[in-house]
Amino acid sequence: MSINKRRDERLNFFKATDAAFTYLKELHDEFGSWTLAMAAY
């Protein structure tokens, strides 16, 4: 996501949601547990 003076894509609901789920998936892959992934999030 781009963040600069003109644009902050963290405020875009769809891009922020996609980034959050991507990060959660990476955490799940690392820890092997959704519970641990959510705790790490």
Image: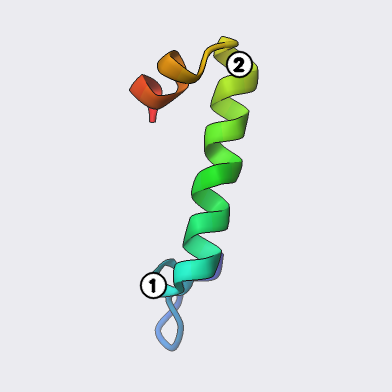
Q: Are marks 1 and 2 in contact (CB under 8 Å)?
A: no
Q: Quadrant of residue 28?
A: top right
Relative depth, front residue between 15 and 8: 15
Res 13 quadrant in image: bottom left
- Give the labeled residue for mark 2: 30
User: Which secondary structure, mark 1?
Assistant: helix
Residue 41 in percent (x, y) is at 38, 31
Q: Which mark is residue 20?
A: none
* N-terminal label among 1 and 2: 1
Which percent across, then down, holds residue 30?
A: 61, 16
Q: Is the residue 13 above or below the residue 37 in the image?
A: below
Seen in the picture, residue 34 relative to 2 is either above or below; the reply is above
Helix, strand or loop at mark 2: helix
Lateral position of residue 25 relative to residue 16, left or right: right
Name the residue: 55% across, 52% down.
19
Residue type highlighted by circle 2: Glu
**Residue 2, relative to residue 33: is it above or below?**
below
The picture places residue 26, in percent across and down from the top left corner, at 61, 30
Instruction: Characterize the local packing of mark 1: few (<14), some (14-19) or many (20 or more) Cα atoms within 10 angstroms.
Output: few
Q: Give how far across and how far down residue 7 sits, in percent.
A: 46, 83
Q: Mark 1 highlights which residue?
A: 11
Judging from the image, the colouring scheme is rainbow
Q: What residue type is labelled 1?
A: Leu
User: In the displayed structure, does residue 41 sit left or right of residue 1?
Assistant: left
